[in-house]
Each structure stands twice: as structure tokens, then as C-alpha cells.
Amino acid sequence: MPVDQSVDTTTPSDLKTLEAGLDNLETSGRPHTSAKSYLARLLSPLIAIAVIIVIWQIVTSLQLQPDYILPTPRQVWDALAQQAAQDLLWQSALNSIKRAGQGFIISIIVATPIGLALGFYPKLRAILGPILTGLQQLPSVAWVPAAIIWFGLSDATIFAVVLLGAVPSIANGLLAGMDQIPPIYLRAGQAMGAKGFGRIWRIVLPAAWPGYLAGLEQGWAFAWRSLMAAELIAVSPALGPGLGQMLDVGRSLGDMALILGAIAMIMAVGILIERLIFSPLRERTLRNRGLIR
Amino acid sequence: MTLPSGARTSVDSDYAVRLTNVVKQYLADGPVIIDDLTLDVRPGEFISLVGASGCGKSTLLNIISGLDRQTSGEVETSGPPSFMFQEAALMPWLTAGKNVELALTFAGVPRSERRTRAEELLSIVHLERSYDQRPHELSGGMRQRVAIARALAQGRSILLMDEPFAALDAITRDLLHEELTRIWIETGLAIIFVTHNVREAVRLSQRVLLMSSRPGRIIQEWNIGGHEPWRLDSPDVANLASVITDELRREIMRHAS
């Protein structure tokens, strides 16, 4: 029987085997570089901290300045230990973290629809975009006096300042993320019949996520800063303790060790949140999308 | 192998796509991109549109899919088509399996059935082991196969393909041709395949339509009929392809002056 050269005689199982072979050849099966362990992630900043403490210790031991101007690491430690003994240290830290966290979550809820609306309606963006950017430039501590007059010395004052700090960054981050969505994803979504809320939830937000996440990270930093400014200025027994208030107590007592201790605590919280939440999220996002190996 | 149940809408009409005097102009006084184009595609038919760049092939697909609108004329389809692009356009934040599930979600498939359905669809394109792989971990050919599975997941009876294999290497493209032919025979989809690769068009389709450029019109048509899947290097493919290529060149030369 003559063989017809023009007809494809590949059987379905040949095809499957051919494809499997090609698939294996073309995907080198490179191993995932495993995420550095959580512990390593937390501990690596300690090296820098240790170096700073050593230099600090050396400088103070030279006694160039009296210790009410530049206390030793030991004195700062003792000041924090004293606060801890009165239960004030953890209470202040937890109180501040809770306030910032609540303010941050409210900010996300407020900022996300704003970002989406501005991203979807260019005309609205032309009107409101510059104001949003202006608000982002404005240090939110500038709002503290106004907020105190409007809301008195209450939690509302503190949340108002935190929101004014965080919302513009989050909304602008989401906008930047939406600007960078490759149009092909939107077209593919449209071809699949994506519309309305499903389109936003399953296509637009995940596609804009890298920019949105950067906005969230910046929003958190602004929320934390704004909170410290608000706590430092709006001091009242009704508000309870906080790290900002601890700074104010140190200032009024002229206790430099306590002031430096409070500063160290504020930084430590910032570093911890970044290491524990934002840094893993960022790495996961980049790795999942093949932007880093 | 059959397509998972419910993944195909039944077609009662005698056409899958019917274009009547379709005209496309982006600006009222601008160039005519598509001029008075009339075309019937039967249910289950595989046609290819070939033409030089700028002949409005892609615009035509966009119009058929509803991603773009014609200036005048009528576009009728037996149902909404699914669309495959030159890029796989998989969502990079989802695994291969979840990309297929996304299409099932938009097609209204209940959550409890999506996983099984997506696995079945991936096994149709021989990627059942790649469910949990991310698009960037797949080769270009594998990505396009996921895109085929995703297109099938939409449960449509028409598939529009805009140069889907243009960016692939020759070996992979060859395998995907066989894969597509097999899937077309199994599913009975009507396929409109846009390409500038004449051999590819001849090998795959039952009908090859040559489009002119500026304005885009169908200037010639070759009926190949329901043939056995051809090899890309077979003499029959080569002979017909050279005839069509000559016509295509004549058309391009017309634009020299």
C-alpha cells in the first residue's frame, strides 16, 4: 500500500508524547529559590542595630556630651525597662499599633473606591487627581490643629489625621497600578465576558496589585507617621497611652533616655511590620508573576 | 474525547458568523479599513483569513467578537465567540488551572464544578500536570495551549484566533497545528483563523480567504474542503500555498506606487 506523504499520520498518542517531550525540554524545571526563612528575615536587620549600638556605646564612653544630652545605650534600655515595669511600654506600643492598624484598614476601605473611580473616569481624575496628589504632599501633621478644633481631643482627631495621611497614598498607588495594567489583560477579560464587579475583583484589582501594594506600603508608613505626630500633639488622659505620648512625657520631663527609647520603639514597630507583612507580600507577588526568581 | 458537558452552546442557525456589507472607518474622513465585506461562516467550519499587514484582519476579528464596532453593515453570530490572541494573555497572578477556572467563572459555571472542569479542559490540551504552574513557568507553546483550554472553557461555538502561533518556534507551531486540528474535529467549533502565514492557513482550514489591504476586502477564496489533516511539508500544501502566496504578492505590489 503506498504511503500518502501528504497526510499527517501522527496518532493522538504520538502527539501527546511529542508534546510532553517538548514541554519537558522547554521548561527547565528550575527550582524555586525558597523564601528565606521568616527568622532570617527578622534577624538580618539586627546586624545593623548591633553596629549602631556599638558605635553609640563608644561615642558615649568618650563622654563628649553630658548624659542628659546623649544618654548611653544602657540608660535608654533602663528607661524602657522602667516603662515596661509599669506596664506602660507594651500598653503604649499595642495601643499605637491598634490605632494605626484600625486607621489603616479604614483608609483602605476609603481609598480603594476613590482610586478605582479615578482610574475608570479620566474626567474625574483630571479634576480630583491633583488634589489627591496635593494631599499626599502635605504632611498630615498639618491637619492636627484643625482636627483638634473639629473633633476635640478624641480618637476621631487621631483617626482623621491618620486617614488624611494614608488615603492619598493608597489611592494614588492603586491609580499607578491601574495605569500599568497591560491592555491585553483587559481585552482578554472582555473577551471572556468580564464585567461589573467581577471584572474589578477578578481582573482589574489583581492586575493593578503591584502598584496597589506599593501604595498600601507607603500608606502604612504615612499612617504610622501621622499617628505619632497626632499622639505627640493631641495628648489627653482620655486618649490613653501611646508611643507618641511617651515621647511627649519624655520631653516634659527632660528625660532624653526615654525620648530615645520611644524613638527606638517607633522605629522597631515600623521595621517589624515591614518585615512581617509587606516584605513577604511583595516578594510573593513578584515571584508569582515571574518578576524575580 | 469529548468536550465537558455544557461547554458548547447548540447552534440552530445555518451560519455561525454572517457579515453583510461590513464597513469600518475609524474617522469619518479617514481611510476605509474594511470595505463592504460580506462573508458567511458555517457552523463547525474552519476558515483562514490571510493578507498583508494592515489589511484589517485583526480589526475584522475585533468587530466579530464585539471588542470593536463596525461603522456600517451587519454582523450576526450564532452566539458570542471566544477569542485567542497572538499572546496567550494568561493572567500572571493565576496558575494555569486558575486561568481556566477564571473563564469558567465568567461563563457562570458553579464554583463546585470549576476545578474538575478545568482539569478536564487542561487534559484536552495535554497539560493536566501543569494545573499549579504559573504562566511564567510555562513555555510559549504551553501558554498557548492553556489559552486554548481557556477559550474552550467559555463554552462558545465560535473561536476567533488572531495569529495565535505567530510568536512560536517552528517545532512548537507544528505540534499546535495538529493539536488545533484535533480539537476542532472533536468540538465542532467554527474557527476564524487570522494569519499572514499562507502555509499555516492552507494546512489548517477548509477555506482560505485572501484579503486586500487598504481597503480590506476579500479578493479571492480557495475551497479546500474537509480534508485529512495535512502535513505542513506536504506537496499539496506547498502547491496551493505557492498559488496563494503569488496572489498575496501581487496584492502587496499593487501598493508599491
Image (cartoon, helix red, strand yellow):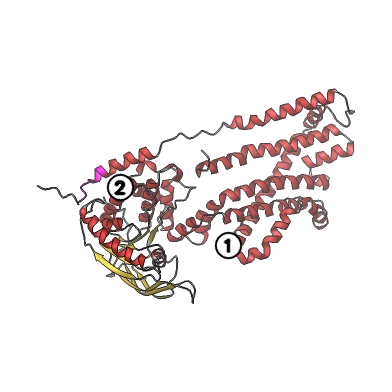
In this orientation, does residue B159 appear? yes
Q: Position of residue A139 (x, y in %)?
A: 77, 51
Q: Position of residue B103 (x, y in %)?
A: 42, 55
Q: Position of residue B196 (x, y in %)?
A: 35, 59
Which residue is nearer to you in this view: A178 or A116? Answer: A178
Region of the chain picked out in magenta, as a range: A7-14
Q: Is residue A11 magenta?
A: yes
Principal secondary structure, stretch drawn in magenta: loop
Q: Nearer the viewer, mark 2 or mark 1?
A: 2
Which residue is nearer to you in this view: B177 or B96? Answer: B177
In this orientation, does residue B45 appear? no
Q: Amino acid at mark 2?
A: Leu
User: What is the residue that sits farthest to the left in this orientation?
Assistant: A1
Q: Which structural element holds mark 1?
A: helix
Q: Which structural element holds mark 2?
A: helix
Q: Amino acid at mark 1?
A: Phe
Q: Which residue is label 2 attached to?
A: B175
Residue at the (60%, 48%) spot, across then down: A213
Mark 2 chain: B
Q: Going by the image, does A26 lie left or right of A274? A: left
Location of residue B49 (image quadrant): bottom left
Location of residue A133 (image quadrant): bottom right
Q: Going by the image, does A265 lie left or right of B186? A: right
Q: Position of residue B230 (x, y in %)?
A: 23, 53
**Mark 1 Cα-neighbour bin, 10 Å: few <14, some 14–19, many ≥20:** few
